[in-house]
């Protein structure tokens, strides 16, 4: 889809999400084949296929911009009317996308050139929640999708009748509070938002599964896993391979963190042979743990830069943070962001209305109408998120000249990895260069810096994997609604070694308390991004001529590195992702050894700390 932003309903066929697949839509879409063959005067040939693709791109382009505008209006001003208009236009878009995907199957047995075949495949495989052919069902699906987004966006927890907290407030408490009772209250409170989502979610899955079946897929899980230029089942094996590479490192980090939390809170609250209670890790979803660095840091005093403090000392406000991030991209040779970006983006949370605060990047017209939508907090963590979002915008701009079906990232992990790759270059040297700090801590302090980053990056990886492991089971019917919540916590324990701090009530729907579930944004992309960004960083540092340790490398100011990066971005999804990866890095394989090498000194340190500890859960 055009673009649209990077995540959300329209994303149904956002180019960003179109994954190339090696299979065509299956022939089981017979009703539509009949429809289209009625207008066909001869058996379809290669010229028909080309013409079909041209027309499909035009039709989708026409529908995507109004749908994106309505989605923007809704997410930045949640009310009944914006919900209705957004659902209406989103449905127009997604029913057209489903119809075209079905018609693409007419060309399954036609010999066409490779470019046309790729576009046909992208058309077939590019939907996130495919609309069923029955208009009533398709409308209902669009309504539910919109409603779920609204419930999440408007969600609040009222501690007392007078005091209602928004998610941004609660996130700040989860990051900074150290009283376990308060943390537990907030953790529980936010999860009261999601039980009303459960029945809607169930209905949504059933409807989208119907849409997937009409396209010839077994269910939406097959569709989601099929977007990676390899058979859907092979993709799961690929994920296992990457996770197996990382797991020993994660286990070591988990072991150290649990031990330190045991010291901080007592082993009654943090039993040393069990998963870690989810409310103590500095984050609402226990997905990244950098906020508890002070609890787990090395005993010896280390000089580790506190970016939050540095931003405050230098009077950075939200706009200055975004300008600073833009200037990093400019230093690599990227054109500045357009004036409209500054006029139309949402940088702060409005006081007078509900909005979807979860950060996102948009290209409303697939050309230059780039925007971000964030409720920026003045923290180092958010400074990184701004780079993350701008990475999406620069990617969107780089592929805007390609045919519509190629406007998107090589695979969805690439889109998520670009801004993060740049943020890996926010090193002490860079911070000194831009005047945020006065001096660069020497190498004897590096363990602290590596630990702080690992708490965000390595801790995230199993979470990045499990969200879709849960969804794929839900989509395939392996997990049924009675078991939604139990299955969620089984995966949290299995992959993360994190457990619910209290018994969950029978109506709980804890997956719904994470944006991407009601927001229907596939999540494996973030797992992939956490691998890819280290591969990209390593390569770009080499191109930039870096001679320091990889964790001290900043590509700031290297136009050579910027050019290499931009050339890959400009490929969009015109080629299988393996080609795009090889184009930049020389290798066609995603490979976690770049992450492991980056953090290698930390692994040694962790192993020493853990030497006499009983690890595991
Ligand atoms: O959703 C995001 C971005 C927008 S694409 C802010 N992320 C995931 C999350 O917040 O759960 C970035 C990392 C993981
Ligand atoms: Zn993102």
Image (tube, rainbow, N blue to C red):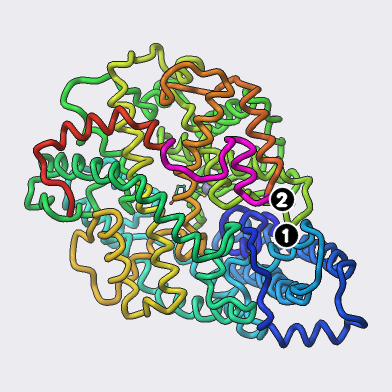
| Location of residue 30 in the rendering, given as x and y in whole percent from the top left corner | 71, 86
Instruction: Give SS at disc 1.
Output: helix
Instruction: Left or right? Give the position of 193 relative to 490.
Output: right
Residue 158 visible from this viewpoint: no
Q: Which residue is mark 2?
A: 574
Write the residue at 38% across / 30% down.
Answer: 308
Sequence-first disc among 2 and 1: 1
Extent of the magenta region: 573-594
Instruction: Left or right? Give the position of 560 relative to 175.
Output: right
Residue in the foreground of this view, choosing between 419 and 572? 572
Q: Which residue is mark 1?
A: 118
Instruction: Give SS at disc 2.
Output: loop
Q: Are marks 2 and 1 in contact (CB under 8 Å)?
A: yes
Q: Is residue 555 above or below residue 249?
A: above
Write the residue at 58% across / 66% down.
Answer: 128
Residue 590 among magenta residues: yes
Q: Is residue 210 above or below residue 230?
A: below
| Location of residue 553 in the rendering, given as x and y in whole percent from the top left corner | 47, 22
Write the residue at 67% across / 54% down.
Answer: 3
């Amino acid at each position: 889809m055009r673009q649209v932003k990077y995540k959300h309903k329209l994303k149904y066929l956002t180019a960003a999400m179109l994954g190339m697949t090696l299979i065509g839509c299956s022939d089981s879409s017979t009703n539509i084949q009949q429809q289209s063959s009625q207008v066909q005067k001869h058996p379809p040939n290669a010229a028909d296929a080309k013409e079909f693709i041209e027309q499909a791109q035009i039709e989708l382009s026409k529908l995507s911009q109004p749908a994106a505008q309505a989605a923007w209006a809704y997410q930045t001003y949640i009310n009944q009317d914006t919900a209705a208009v957004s659902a209406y236009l989103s449905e127009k878009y997604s029913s057209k996308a489903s119809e075209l995907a079905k018609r693409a199957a007419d060309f399954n047995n036609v010999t066409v050139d490779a470019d046309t075949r790729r576009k046909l495949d992208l058309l077939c495989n590019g939907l996130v929640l495919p609309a069923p052919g029955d208009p009533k069902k398709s409308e209902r699906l669009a309504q539910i999708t919109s409603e779920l987004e609204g419930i999440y966006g408007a969600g609040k927890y009222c501690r007392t009748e007078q005091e209602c907290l928004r998610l941004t407030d609660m996130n700040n408490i989860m990051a900074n509070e150290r009283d376990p009772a308060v943390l537990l209250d907030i953790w529980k409170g936010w999860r009261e938002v999601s039980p009303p989502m459960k029945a809607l979610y169930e209905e949504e899955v059933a409807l989208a599964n119907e849409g997937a079946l009409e396209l010839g897929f077994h269910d939406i899980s097959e569709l989601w896993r099929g977007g990676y230029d390899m058979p859907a089942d092979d993709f799961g094996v690929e994920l296992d391979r990457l996770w197996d590479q990382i797991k020993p490192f994660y286990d070591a980090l988990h072991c150290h963190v649990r031990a330190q939390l045991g010291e901080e809170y007592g082993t009654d609250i943090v039993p040393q042979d069990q998963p870690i209670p989810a409310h103590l890790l500095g984050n609402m979803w226990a997905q990244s743990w950098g906020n508890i660095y002070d609890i787990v840091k090395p005993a010896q005093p280390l000089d580790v830069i506190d970016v939050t403090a540095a931003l405050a000392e230098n009077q950075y406000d939200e706009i200055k943070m975004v300008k600073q991030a833009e200037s990093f991209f400019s230093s690599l040779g990227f054109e500045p962001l357009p004036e409209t970006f500054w006029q139309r983006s949402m940088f702060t949370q409005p006081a007078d209305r509900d909005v979807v605060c979860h950060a996102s990047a948009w290209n409303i017209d697939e050309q230059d109408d780039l925007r971000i939508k964030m409720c920026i907090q003045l923290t180092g963590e958010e400074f990184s998120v701004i780079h993350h979002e701008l990475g999406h915008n620069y990617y969107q701009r780089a592929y805007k000249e390609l045919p519509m079906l190629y406007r998107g990232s090589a695979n969805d992990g690439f889109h998520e990895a670009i801004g993060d790759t740049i943020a890996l270059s926010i090193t002490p040297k860079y911070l000194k260069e831009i005047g945020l700090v006065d001096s660069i801590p020497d190498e004897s302090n590096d363990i602290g810096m590596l630990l702080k980053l690992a708490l965000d990056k390595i801790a995230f990886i199993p979470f990045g994997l499990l969200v879709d492991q849960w969804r794929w089971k839900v989509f395939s019917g392996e997990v049924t609604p009675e078991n939604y919540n139990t299955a969620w916590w089984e995966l949290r324990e299995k992959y993360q070694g994190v457990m619910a701090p209290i018994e969950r009530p029978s109506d709980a729907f804890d997956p719904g308390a994470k944006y991407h579930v009601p927001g229907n944004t596939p999540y494996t992309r973030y797992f992939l991004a956490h691998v890819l960004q280290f591969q990209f960083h390593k390569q770009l540092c080499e191109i930039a001529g870096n001679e320091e340790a990889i964790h001290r490398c900043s590509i700031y100011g290297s136009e050579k590195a910027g050019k290499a990066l931009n050339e890959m971005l400009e490929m969009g999804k015109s080629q299988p992702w393996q080609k795009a990866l090889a184009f930049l890095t020389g290798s066609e394989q995603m490979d976690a050894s770049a992450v492991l090498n980056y953090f290698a000194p930390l692994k040694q340190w962790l192993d020493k700390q853990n030497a006499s500890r009983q690890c595991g859960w």
